[in-house]
Image (cartoon, grey):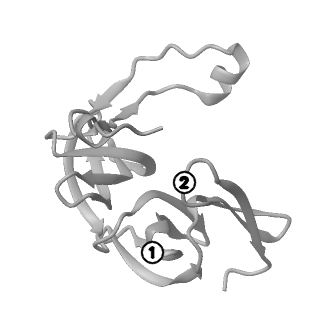
Amino acid sequence: MKTKYSKYISKLFFKQWIIGICQENIQEILRTKTFDPKIHWIDATSSEKFYADPFPISYKNGKLKILYEEYSYEKDYGTISLMTIDKDFRPIDNKILLDTNSHLSYPFYYSENNKTYVFPESADNDKLSCYEFSHEDESLVFMKDILDIPLYDSTILKYDNKYWIFGVTGRNSTSYKLAIFYSKDRK
């Protein structure tokens, strides 16, 4: 139950997400059932934003590229950004790839036939859209809307010659439901 003071109390606190990177072998973690790595934390550069939902998209020449949500408290929504990290786990560059003036997060990607497709969560817009990621100029190009429903944290995979989308529907934490969709082709 909310009190008459809750809206004031919530202004005293704010969420602050950060990204952590570690170099560990997932098979070794599963085999030993232990996880105690050195984690390299990447904080946002100011208290006016936070970083969340990291997806490493490439690694070459000692540089790691990560797609992630960059949330701005001033704008009150997230954008999809790309961060470049050097071999010492220091951010050396980041840029916004997609800003729709509404909340975007969880930039899940799927690669097939030398192409990379990004499906950022855009549940506030009641749709799931597909973008192609260009590795050459590090940009996102709109392909098409996939679903016209609010779908949170969608994850796409190919199994048994079908494309599967897993996500969560619902508008509040008491009514979330897992949803699963499939298609026999990418169109």
Instruction: Please rate how many residues cluster around mark 1, counting C-alpha atoms within 10 Å: few if below 14, some from 14 to 19, many from 20.
Output: some
Q: Amino acid at mark 1?
A: Asn
- Answer left or right for 155 relative to 92: right
Q: How many marks?
A: 2
Residue 97 in percent (x, y) is at 29, 67
Q: Where 164 falls versus 30 (above or below)?
A: below
On screen, 24 above or below 163?
above
| Of the pair 175 and 1, the residue shown nearer to us | 1
**Residue 186 figure quarter:** bottom right
Q: Circle 1 sits in a helix, a strand or a loop, which is it?
A: helix
Where residue 101 sits, quadrant-wise, is bottom left
Per the image, the residue denoted by label 1 is 125
Say which element carries label 2.
loop
| Residue 172 numbered tag | 2
- In the rendered image, residue 111, in percent from the top left (x then y), is placed at 58, 64
Residue 54 higher or lower than 25, as above or below: below
Q: Residue furthest front?
A: 4
Tell me what residue is drawn at x 52 percent, y 25 percent: 24
Q: Which marked residue is nearer to the observer: mark 1 or mark 2? A: 2
x 75%, y 63%: residue = 180
Number of residues whose C-alpha sits closer than 10 Å to that of mark 2, classed few (under 14), some (14–19) or many (20 or more): few
Q: Quadrant of the C terminus?
A: bottom right
Q: Residue at left 61%, top 72%?
A: 113
Q: Residue at x 42, y 39 (%)?
A: 2
Residue 8 percent coordinates (x, y): 23, 39
Q: Position of residue 107 (x, y in %)?
A: 46, 59
Q: Earlier in the sequence, mark 1 or mark 2?
A: 1
